[in-house]
Image: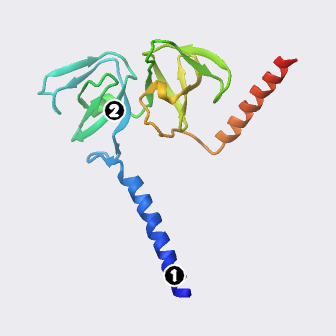
Amino acid sequence: MLLYKKISMQIIIAFISIIIFSQVSNADIGKETGLEIPRYVSLKSNDANIRVGPSKNYPIEIKYIKKYYPLKVLEEYEDWRKVEDFQKNFGWIHKSLISGTRTGIVLSNDNKTIKLLNTLNGYVIGEIGKGNIVFLKKCKIDWCLLSSKNYKGWIDKKYIWGVKEKEIINISFFQRFDDLYWKSVNYLKKIQRGF
């Protein structure tokens, strides 16, 4: 009986290890940085060139003139990163022109504005149009807290290019309390409107 429990425990540990390794190995690791590939970055300046290949000797394919424009890193080669934008344009950019600041672009299939909420499933506090570049402050499984100029609010993640489908960004233990607070505030507002 003791041998059976010991073997069962080893099988369970092996199974859990396989699950953990399969999750970790789904992401490639960049040869130069050791960071996950693909990953999202943004432009550091209002003047950045995307080239056909990983060197200044290659011709310029695209010139970006918008600081914080989000890009997806697909490959690394020495000081160069192969990137893709939300319109599926791709090429090589020097690492000095990108940063880890997380930004995204608002998407909409029907060209409508997207509603910003005060909290998850909360009240509408504003709208944001397609094509706007936003800063990603926090992301949960399906929602992101974003800011643009002096505005911030929650938006469904499906309307943002620049974040992975189930990626979580900057969520702390205390986020649960923050969510509970806003849920309570919204509930009290609904009750007050009923009277």
Count all numbered tags in the image, as a single digit: 2
Choose top left, top right, bottom left or bottom right for residue 2. bottom right
Measuring 68% from the left and 35% from the top, which residue is drawn there? Answer: 179
Quadrant in which the C terminus is drawn: top right
Mark sitting on residue 171: none
Measuring 67% from the left and 41% from the top, which residue is drawn there? Answer: 176
Measuring 84% from the left and 19% from the top, which residue is drawn there? Answer: 194
Give coordinates of residue 62: x percent, y percent: 23, 19
Q: Amino acid at mark 2?
A: Lys
The span from disc 2 to disc 1 (Cα, nearest Å) is 46 Å
Choose top left, top right, bottom left or bottom right for residue 177. top right
Choose top left, top right, bottom left or bottom right for residue 53. top left
Q: Is residue 5 visible?
A: yes
Q: Secondary structure at mark 1?
A: helix
* Residue at image mark 2: 72
Give coordinates of residue 19: x percent, y percent: 44, 59
Measuring 37% from the left and 32% from the top, which residue is drawn there? Answer: 41
* Mark 1, other Cα within 10 Å: few <14 / some 14–19 / many ≥20: few
Quadrant in which the N terminus is drawn: bottom right
Mark sitting on residue 6: 1
Q: Amino acid at mark 1?
A: Lys
Q: Nearer the viewer, mark 2 or mark 1?
A: 1
Residue farthest right in this picture: 195
* Mark 2, other Cα within 10 Å: few <14 / some 14–19 / many ≥20: many
In the displayed structure, does residue 14 sit left or right of residue 116? left
Q: Is residue 34 visible?
A: no
Task: Tell me: residue 66, above or below residue 143.
Answer: above
Of residues 26 and 81, the one nearer the viewer is 26
In the displayed structure, does residue 117 sit left or right of residue 139? right
Give coordinates of residue 27: x percent, y percent: 35, 48
Q: Secondary structure at mark 2?
A: strand
Of residues 167 and 150, the one nearer the viewer is 167
